[in-house]
Image (cartoon, rainbow, N blue to C red):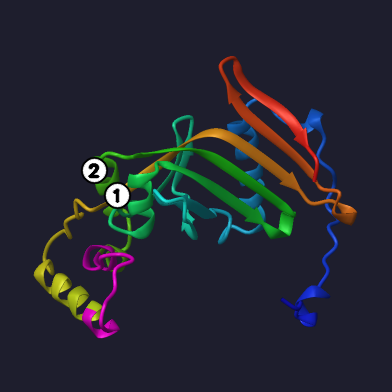
Amino acid sequence: MSNTPEISALRREYVAAGLHRDDMLADPLAQFGEWMQAALQAHPDDATSMTLATADADGWPAARIVLLKRYDADGFCWFTDFRSEKGQHLQQNPQAELMFYWRGLERQVRIRGRVEQLTHADGETYFHQRPRGSQLSAAASTQSHPVDHRTTLEQRVAALDNAHAEGVIPCPETWGGYCLVPQQYEFWQGRENRLHDRFRYILTASGWMLERLQP
């Protein structure tokens, strides 16, 4: 396969300050919190966007962008339709990886772990915090499944809106949240000449182990 010259010739230089072992906190969640705050200050609209990578029972991978909605000592949470492709994957193989990329800061964080489904009460609480239009779209759509035409979706949304014009839109049992419980973190800082800084935290029986990785 030949390279496309317009792509292969592209270059970018990383100029951010380095990342040293002494800079890294003992708790990777606290380290993530510092980086997230910096990202929120620099680019608040995109800071919580993360790539969610899953794989089905046969090992076929899939990745997509979702939004982080909560993170704490219990894990990293997002919400979706359980019938979606990611929902089906997580039912077959409840292991996943999250990746945050903050271009302006030349930083990347990868978080790997097992995924647990949140309670319906958790999903319902967040569902009713969303704008009404988002609630209607989520309730009317069977995410990732084929549909004959966009008009069909629009008609479903309109019918649901009319059916609940005077009341609350019920949160479907098929919609809710997931929580990834970290077993590994990797923090990446871009550096000149591609000699990037990478640090990995691995959860062991005695706590978090920190090691530097080659770029």
Residue nearer the viewer, 142 or 36? 142
Residue 48 relative to residue 124: left or right: right
Query: Mark 1 or mark 2, which has the lower sequence index?
Result: 2
Q: Which residues are magenta?
A: 136-152
Circles 1 and 2: CB distance less than 8 Å? yes
- Residue 144: x and y in percent read 33, 66
- Residue 14 is marked as none
Query: Residue at the location (64% across, 55% down)?
Result: 101
The secondary element bearing badge 1 is classed as: strand
- Residue 192: x and y in percent read 89, 54
Residue 43 relative to residue 73: left or right: right
Q: Residues within 10 Å of mark 1 (few under 14, many from 20)?
A: many
Q: Does 88 appear in magenta?
A: no
Query: Residue at the location (54% across, 54% down)?
Result: 50
In the rendered image, which quarter contains the N terminus? bottom right
| Looking at the image, residue 15 lies above or below residue 12 | above
Query: Residue at the location (12% across, 61% down)?
Result: 167
- Residue 120 is marked as 2
Q: Amino acid at mark 2?
A: His
- Residue 23: x and y in percent read 78, 32
Residue nearer the viewer, 171 or 54? 54
| Looking at the image, residue 78 lies above or below residue 76 | below
How many marks the image carries: the answer is 2
Query: Residue at the location (57% across, 41% down)?
Result: 111
